[in-house]
Image (tube, helix red, strand yellow):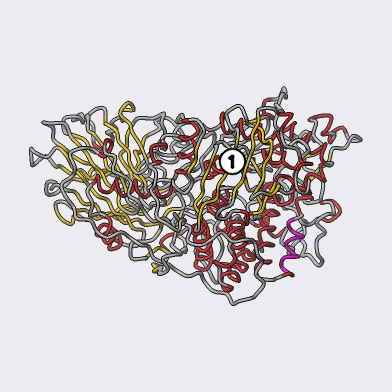
C-alpha cells in the first residue's frame, strides 16, 4: 500500500547541505459519507465485498484478497503478550477496546487495558497501548447498563459488570461482546480518529450509559466536560502515564438518541472528585433499544476533535466498519502468501496486523498536531506534507530490530516517513526520543535507538532524503551520542521531567569526555585496549566509584548505535565523524572477559562450557563481582543490576554490528559454534535459587536465550556465521511453531508495539536483518511455498520448493539467480520488481546447505 517509489540500491551520498527541520505534512481523509439509519444486521455478520483499489506498490490496479479472515486479534491477549483485541484502523489514533480490572493483581497483565484472564469490566475505552510492559493511556471509558441490571445499593462508580467471554468476537476494525449482567450487546469499530459504539439493550429495560473517569493505568487524571446539547458532550481529559508529563486529550461525543436533561456526575468520593462517572439516561423514550455513539479524538483542541468528527464521524456503524476493513485489506495485501498450514496463515497475518497498530497517526484531519515539547508545554503546529505525516507511540528500543527494517521492505514509503517524523521530533524537542508517547519523552529503555531507524532508512533510500535532511539526521545523531548534562540543557530548555532517562550520565564515559575516574579525556580512547589498561570507553558498573546501573547493556547498545551514526556520517560525507564513531562502535571489546584456565573464578569453559562472557567492569578496570567475590552469569536484578531485563547469557551476544569480530574474540568458528550450542541448551542448576532468578521479561526460554525479549531476537541467526548454519533453520522453526501460534497466549513475550510480530513475519518470509542499521539480510526458515511482495513496477517473489512442516532445512538458496554471500547474506538492493529469493527445502539435515556452497563461503 505504501510503496510509491522503487526500492533503491545502496549508495552513499557525500554532498553536504545545511541543517533544517523535516518537512511537515497533512493527512488525506476520505470525503464525508451521508449518515443513514444504522443497519439492522450487525457488522459481525456483514461481509462487504472488498473493492478493487489502487495500491501505491503496484503499477496497475488489482483485486485485493480478503485477508482479514486470517487475523485473530485475540492472539497476544493472554500470557505476557499484553495486546488488546479492540477495534482499530491501521495505525489509527483511536483504539477501541474493553477495559478490564485485574482485581487483586499488580496491573502488569493489563498494560493494554485488557487481558483475557479477566472479565470485570470498567468500560469500553478509546486509547490504548499494544503489547507494552508499562501501562498507559486508557482514557475515559463508556459503560452501557440498565436500571434493572445495576443493583440499587451499588453506586455506578463501584459497578463493574462482566463481559461474557463466550460471546466475544474480534476481527480487524471490529469487536463484539455481551455484558453478562444486563445482556447488553456491544459492538465497536473505528476509523482513524473516530470510535464507534453500538449498544443494543434488551426489550423492556431502561438504557443508560456511564462515562467513566479513573486513574486506571495512569499516574494522574483530571477532566472537564461540557454538555453541548441533549445528544452531544465535549470532554477534556488530562493525564500522566508511562512517565509523561501532563497531557490533554479532547473528545467530542455524539449520540444518535437524546439523553435526559441534567445528567448526574457521581464522584468516587468527596476526596476523589476527578474519579467518577457521568450517567446519561436514555430511558425517556421507551422505544429506544439501540444506541449509537461516535467519539472523535484530538490531541490538539476541542475544535480539533469536533472537526475530526465532522470529517470521519458521518458514517453509519456498518459503513465505518466496511471502510476500516478495506484499509486493513490494503495493508495485509502488502504480502500475499501461498501454502503453509491454516495455523501458519492465521499466525502470519495476525502478526502482520500487529505490525500496523503503531506508531499511530498523531495529527488531526487538518494537519494540526501537538509538537514534541513535553506534555502541555507543547505547541500546536500544522503539518502540510501528505507524504510526511506525524505519528506517535515509538517503542524504538524494541522496534529498531525488526519492525522498522520490515517496513523498508514491504512499506518503504512509510519507513521513510517514520524516519523523517523522528527527525521532526528531534528539531522540536531538542533530542531524539527512545520511547516517545504523544509528543513527550518517557525516558525508558537503553541508549539512543532512533539513530538506527534513521540510518537504516537513509542508507536504503538515500534519494528520498534531501541533503538538508541528511545533515539534520547527523546533527540529531550527534546530539544523542554526545552527553550534555541536564543543568547545561536547563539554561536554554527548562521543564524536563525525565531528562536523566532520555540521556543518561553514563554516556560521558564513552563519548570521549571523561574516563571512568571522572577525569577529562586528553587523548583518544583505544577501543581494543582492555578496560584495566585504558580506563575509558566503557560504562563503569555499580559497586565502586561512578558506578552506573545496567552498565553492560548500555555499553553494548551504545556501541551498536554508534555504528548507526557511522552509516549516517557516511551518507553526508563526514569521514571524520565516521572514523570517530567507528572506533566507538568497537568499545564492546571492553566488556569481554575470556575464560582463564589459570584462574578458577574465571574458568568459564570449565564452569559453563563458554569461552567467555560480556561482564560488568568497575571504574578502576577490575571485573565486577558479587558480594561473595564471584561473578554469576545467571544473576539478574531488574532495573538495578548490570544488565537490562536479562543476564550475561543473553547480552554476551549483543554485537550485531560486528558478528565477525565477536566470533573472532570468542575463539573462531569452533568456539563460536560451541558457545551458541551452549547458550541454547544451558540450564541453571545452581543450588542457590537466587542465582537462577528470571524476571517477567525473560520468557520463551530456549536454554539461556530469552526469546520473549528483544535483546535475544538476533541470536538464532548467528549460526549462519558458523560451519553448521542449519542450526538457524532448526531454532527458527522451533520458535515459529512453539513460541508463536493461534491461542490467546501465543505471543511469548510483550509484543512491544509490533516487534515480536515483525520478527515472526520476517523469519516466515525467510530472512532477517541482524543489524538494524545495516542493509544486509541473512536467511531464516521460510514457511510458505510462495510469497509475493508488490513493488512499484511489479512483484518480488519468494519461493520455497519442496516446503512442508517436516522440510525445515535449506538444501539450496539463490537471490535473483545468484548464490548468497558469506554467512548466508544478501544486500537489501536485491529486493526489486521481478526479483526472486528461491529456496529448495529438505527434511534431511545431511543435505542442508553448507557455508562452502556460498559465493564467498
Measuring 58% from the left and 70% from the top, which residue is drawn there?
472
What kind of element bears circle 1? helix
Let me know if residue 269 appears in the view. Answer: no
Of the pair 569 and 689, the residue shown nearer to us = 569
> Would residue 797 be found to the left or right of residue 138 on screen?
right
Q: Position of residue 567 (x, y in %)?
A: 67, 62
**What range of the chain is rendered magenta?**
576-585
Q: Which residue is mark 1?
A: 763
Majority secondary structure in the magenta region: helix
Percent position (x, y) of residue 849? Answer: 72, 37
Give the residue displayed 32% in from the left and 38% down from the top. Answer: 175
Number of numbered tags placed on the structure image: 1
Q: Quadrant of the C terminus?
A: top right
Task: Give x and y (percent) for residue 296.
Answer: 29, 54
Q: Residue at x 75, y 53 (%)?
A: 538
- Quadrant of the rendered structure where residue 66 is? top left
Q: Quadrant of the N terminus?
A: bottom left
Which one is in front, 561 or 529? 561
Q: Is residue 583 magenta?
A: yes
Amino acid at each position: 500500500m505504501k510503496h510509491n517509489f522503487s526500492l533503491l540500491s545502496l549508495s552513499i551520498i557525500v554532498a553536504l547541505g545545511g541543517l533544517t527541520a523535516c518537512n511537515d505534512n497533512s493527512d488525506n481523509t476520505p470525503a464525508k459519507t451521508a449518515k443513514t439509519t444504522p443497519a439492522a444486521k450487525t457488522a459481525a455478520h456483514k461481509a462487504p465485498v472488498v473493492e478493487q483499489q489502487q495500491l501505491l506498490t503496484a503499477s496497475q490496479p488489482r483485486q485485493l484478497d480478503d485477508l482479514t479472515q486470517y487475523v485473530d486479534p485475540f492472539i497476544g491477549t493472554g500470557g505476557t503478550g499484553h495486546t488488546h483485541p479492540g477495534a482499530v484502523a491501521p495505525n489509527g489514533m483511536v483504539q477501541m477496546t474493553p477495559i478490564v480490572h485485574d482485581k487483586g493483581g499488580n496491573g502488569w497483565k493489563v498494560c493494554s487495558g485488557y487481558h483475557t484472564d479477566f472479565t470485570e469490566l470498567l468500560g469500553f475505552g478509546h486509547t490504548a497501548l499494544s503489547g507494552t510492559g508499562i501501562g498507559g493511556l486508557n482514557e475515559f471509558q463508556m459503560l452501557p447498563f440498565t436500571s434493572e441490571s445495576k443493583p440499587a445499593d451499588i453506586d455506578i462508580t463501584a459497578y463493574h459488570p462482566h463481559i461474557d467471554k463466550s460471546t466475544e468476537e474480534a476481527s480487524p476494525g471490529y469487536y463484539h461482546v455481551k455484558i453478562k449482567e444486563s445482556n447488553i450487546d456491544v459492538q465497536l469499530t473505528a476509523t482513524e480518529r473516530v470510535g464507534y459504539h453500538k449498544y443494543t439493550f434488551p426489550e423492556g429495560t431502561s438504557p443508560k450509559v456511564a462515562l467513566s473517569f479513573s486513574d486506571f493505568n495512569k499516574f494522574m487524571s483530571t477532566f472537564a466536560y461540557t454538555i453541548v446539547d441533549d445528544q452531544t458532550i465535549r470532554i477534556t481529559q488530562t493525564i500522566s502515564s508511562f512517565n509523561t508529563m501532563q497531557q490533554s486529550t479532547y473528545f467530542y461525543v455524539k449520540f444518535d438518541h437524546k439523553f435526559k436533561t441534567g445528567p448526574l456526575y457521581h464522584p468516587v468520593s468527596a476526596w476523589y472528585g476527578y474519579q467518577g462517572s457521568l450517567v446519561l439516561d436514555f430511558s425517556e423514550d421507551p422505544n429506544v433499544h439501540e444506541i449509537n455513539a461516535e467519539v472523535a479524538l484530538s490531541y490538539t483542541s476541542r475544535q480539533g476533535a469536533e472537526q475530526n468528527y465532522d470529517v470521519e464521524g458521518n458514517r453509519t456503524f456498518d459503513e465505518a466498519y466496511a471502510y476500516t476493513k478495506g484499509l486493513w485489506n490494503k495493508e495485509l495485501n502488502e504480502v500475499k502468501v501461498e501454502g503453509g498450514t491454516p495455523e501458519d496463515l492465521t499466525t502470519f497475518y495476525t502478526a502482520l496486523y500487529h505490525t500496523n497498530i503503531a506508531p499511530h497517526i498523531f495529527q488531526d484531519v487538518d494537519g494540526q498536531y501537538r509538537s514534541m515539547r513535553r506534555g502541555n508545554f507543547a505547541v500546536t503546529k500544522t503539518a502540510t506534507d501528505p507524504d510526511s505525516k506525524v505519528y506517535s507511540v515509538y517503542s524504538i528500543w524494541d522496534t529498531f530490530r525488526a519492525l522498522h527494517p520490515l517496513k523498508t521492505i514491504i512499506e518503504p514509503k512509510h519507513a521513510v516517513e517514520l524516519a523523517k517524523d523522528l527527525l521532526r521530533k528531534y528539531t522540536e524537542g531538542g533530542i531524539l526520543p527512545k520511547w516517545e508517547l504523544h509528543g513527550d519523552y518517557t525516558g525508558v529503555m537503553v541508549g539512543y535507538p532512533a539513530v538506527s531507524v534513521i540510518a537504516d532508512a537513509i542508507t536504503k533510500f538515500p534519494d528520498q532524503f534531501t541533503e538538508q535532511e541528511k545533515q539534520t539526521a547527523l546533527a540529531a545523531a550527534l546530539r544523542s551520542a554526545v552527553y550534555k548534562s541536564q543543568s547545561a540543557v536547563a539554561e536554554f530548555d527548562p521543564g524536563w521531567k525525565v531528562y536523566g532517562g532520555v540521556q543518561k550520565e553514563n554516556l560521558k564515559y564513552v563519548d570521549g569526555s571523561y574516563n571512568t575516574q571522572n577525569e577529562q579525556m586528553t587523548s583518544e580512547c583505544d577501543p581494543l585496549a582492555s578496560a584495566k589498561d585504558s580506563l575509558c570507553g566503557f560504562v563503569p558498573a555499580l559497586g565502586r566509584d561512578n558506578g552506573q546501573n545496567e552498565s553492560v547493556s548500555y555499553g553494548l547498545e551504545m556501541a551498536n548505535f554508534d555504528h548507526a551514526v557511522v552509516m549516517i556520517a557516511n551518507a553526508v560525507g563526514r569521514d571524520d565523524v565516521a572514523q570517530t564513531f567507528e572506533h566507538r562502535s568497537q568499545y564492546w571489546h571492553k566488556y569481554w572477559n575470556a575464560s582463564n584456565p589459570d584462574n578458577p573464578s574465571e574458568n568459564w569453559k570449565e564452569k559453563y562450557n563458554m569461552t567467555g562472557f560480556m561482564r560488568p567492569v568497575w571504574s578502576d578496570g577490575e571485573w565486577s563481582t558479587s558480594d561473595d567475590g564471584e561473578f554469576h552469569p545467571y544473576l539478574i536484578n531488574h532495573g538495578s543490576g548490570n544488565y537490562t531485563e536479562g543476564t550475561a547469557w543473553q547480552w554476551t551476544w549483543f554485537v550485531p554490528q560486528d558478528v565477525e569480530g565477536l566470533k573472532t574474540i570468542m575463539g573462531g568458528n569452533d568456539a563460536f559454534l560451541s558457545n551458541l550450542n551452549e547458550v541454547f541448551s544451558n540450564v541453571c542448576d545452581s543450588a542457590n535459587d537466587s542465582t537462577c532468578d528470571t524476571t517477567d521479561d525473560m520468557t520463551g526460554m530456549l536454554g539461556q536465550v530469552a526469546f520473549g525479549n528483544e535483546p535475544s531476537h538476533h541470536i538464532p541467526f548467528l549460526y549462519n556465521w558458523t560451519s553448521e548454519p542449519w542450526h538457524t533453520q532448526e531454532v527458527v522453526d522451533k520458535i515459529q511453531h512453539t513460541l508463536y501460534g493461534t491461542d490467546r497466549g501465543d505471543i511469548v513475550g510483550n509484543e512491544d508495539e509490533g516487534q515480536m510480530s515483525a520478527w515472526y513475519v520476517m523469519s516466515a518470509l525467510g530472512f532477517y536483518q541482524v543489524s538494524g542499521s545495516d542493509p544486509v539480510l541473512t536467511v531464516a526458515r521460510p514457511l510458505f511455498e510462495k510469497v509475493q511482495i508488490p513493488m512499484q513496477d511489479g512483484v518480488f517473489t519468494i519461493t520455497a520448493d519442496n516446503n512442508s512442516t517436516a522440510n525445515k532445512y535449506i538444501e539450496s538458496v539463490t537471490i535473483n539467480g545468484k548464490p548468497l554471500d558469506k554467512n548466508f547474506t544478501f544486500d537489501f538492493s536485491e529486493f526489486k520488481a521481478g526479483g526472486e529469493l528461491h529456496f529448495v527445502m529438505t527434511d534431511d539435515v545431511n543435505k542442508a546447505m553448507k557455508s562452502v556452497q556460498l559465493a564467498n563461503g
